[in-house]
Amino acid sequence: MTNSNKPSTPNILFIQTDQLTAFALGAYGCEFAKTPHIDALAHNGAVFENAYCNFPLCAPSRYSMASGQLASRIGAYDNAVEFPASIPTYAHYLRSFGYQTCLSGKMHFVGPDQLHGFEQRLTPDIYPADFSWAPNWKNEGQRDTSDTTGVTVSGKCLDSVQLKYDNLVQERALDKLTELSKSSDQRPFFLQVSYTHPHDPYLCLPEHWDLYDDVDIPLPSIGAMHSSKHDVHSARILKQHSMLDFEFDQNDIRRARRAYFGSVSYIDDCVGELVSMLEQLNLRENTIVVFTSDHGEMMGERGMWFKKTFFEPAMRIPLIVNNASRFSPTRIETPASLVDLLPSFMAWASAGQWRAIIEPLDGHDLTPFILGEQTNLNRTIRAEYLSETTPAPIYMIKKGQYKFVYSVEDPLLLFDLDSDPDETANIASLTSMKAVVEEFKHDIEQHWDNTALTDAILLSQSRRQLIIAASKFGHKDYWDYDEGSIESVPWYRGLQGYNQWAYDYTPEDQE
């Protein structure tokens, strides 16, 4: 039997990438990006020009997105903190409205609950579900993290663990769509397909590498800077990754950036296959396709790679909503963020009737902006960083032309993005900006209790450090999804160093 849903209850195909900055897509102005399928979604859909993550790190960003709440409100402090099973997610809410929910790919869930409202999960996760990556502000020590290898070991490859994972994600997602089209279950579906690309390592297949043969991929707009020129948090991050005052060879930079764009083109192919499958199965008309990422990527700007910072390349993400029967093509300047997804999904599921009656959410339904019924260029976007490489919580507020970054331990940062899009001039100390700074500080006081949050983070870290220490004795329990034993799985389970695992596949060459 063919799945035929009422027009008022659309299917939702939610496509998520990992570490994809909006600036790497043709739809967002990158003239040389080879992303025709994503660009087609944008051309025929609603494009949020100014979409942000709420935490520039994988797991907290995803927990925040799934719950519609800032990470600090739900205890999602870092990449190794449990996502409480008691926190409702969009999967729970959608199920309560009659949806069948399914996940293929990465969500970075930590803890024994590996479903969080999804009825079915098609793949394991690529990263561990235990506390092995827990930070320790009291003693940072030597963390197992990416380093200069991320840039120097880059290029094209014939295989990688990331490719193995995303190929599995894609295969099972496509099979699931076929299954849904034939199912006697008449409930609309919510299918989340979540890839690990273009997350480092910066490796891509030859066919995607070759797409950029005749492309002069530019070097970063702002190159590596001396440690004295960096803000305090940036210097800490660079030091953690062994990149502080390290200047990469230009050939390494070009190769890593080319491989990153090659990985983006790989994702574009995956998106094209998913949309094509919807069309073949006659599911396209009644399926809203949403495309986004958990956070961005610095790609060498300011000498920085990866994320963990509030600069635009790490914070700005693509957000595209596409369904021709419901939404006309449009480009939306009103700022949006990932916490807006849950209320938007529920608005579509309920024909606009759903209200958050359980608890207040930090996100809001984006539909009025998509339909052109509302616009708000001064809409406030809030974000946080509460993980490793900081001695205290860091908060970001973006409102209008200004971005403000605050921590009790670090000097204030204020940027005027209209006149300074590269964020090179910190104007926080200017007399003319005093009122602006005070307004932002007042906002922070209203939305965060810094002392209480700091105490909660330190307690959480101490608890987890004890559990990590205790687990070294006797039998160790694993929460990883659908794995009786982790000894032979190819995904990262903390049994060796991260670099040893991630860069096990040497690039085919170092052109």
Image (tube, rainbow, N blue to C red):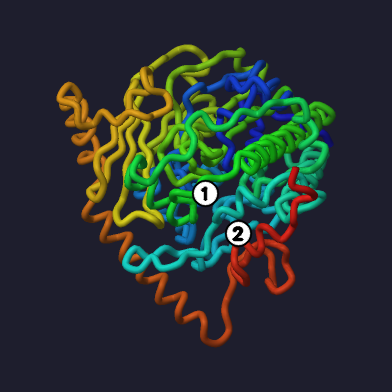
The numbered dot on residue 127 is: 2
Q: Quarter of the image for the C terminus: give it.
A: top right
Helix, strand or loop at disc 1?
A: helix
**Which residue type carries mark 1?**
Cys
**Quick check: marks 1 and 2 in contact, CB under 8 Å?**
yes
Q: Give how far across and how far down residue 391 sits, in percent.
A: 30, 57
User: Front-most of 113 and 429?
Assistant: 429
Would you say 303 lies left or right of 493 here? left
Q: Give how far across and how far down residue 153 sits, in percent.
A: 67, 52
* Marks 1 and 2, the one that precedes in the sequence: 1
**Which residue type carries mark 2?**
Tyr
Q: Quarter of the image for the N terminus: give it.
A: top right
For the point 41% across and 70% down, which residue is it?
Answer: 464
Image-quadrant location for residue 395: top left
Q: Give how far across and how far down residue 320 sits, in percent.
A: 59, 26
Q: Residue furthest bottom?
A: 474
Say which residue label 1 marks.
58
User: How packed is label 2: few (under 14 Cα within 10 Å), some, or many (20 or more)?
Assistant: many
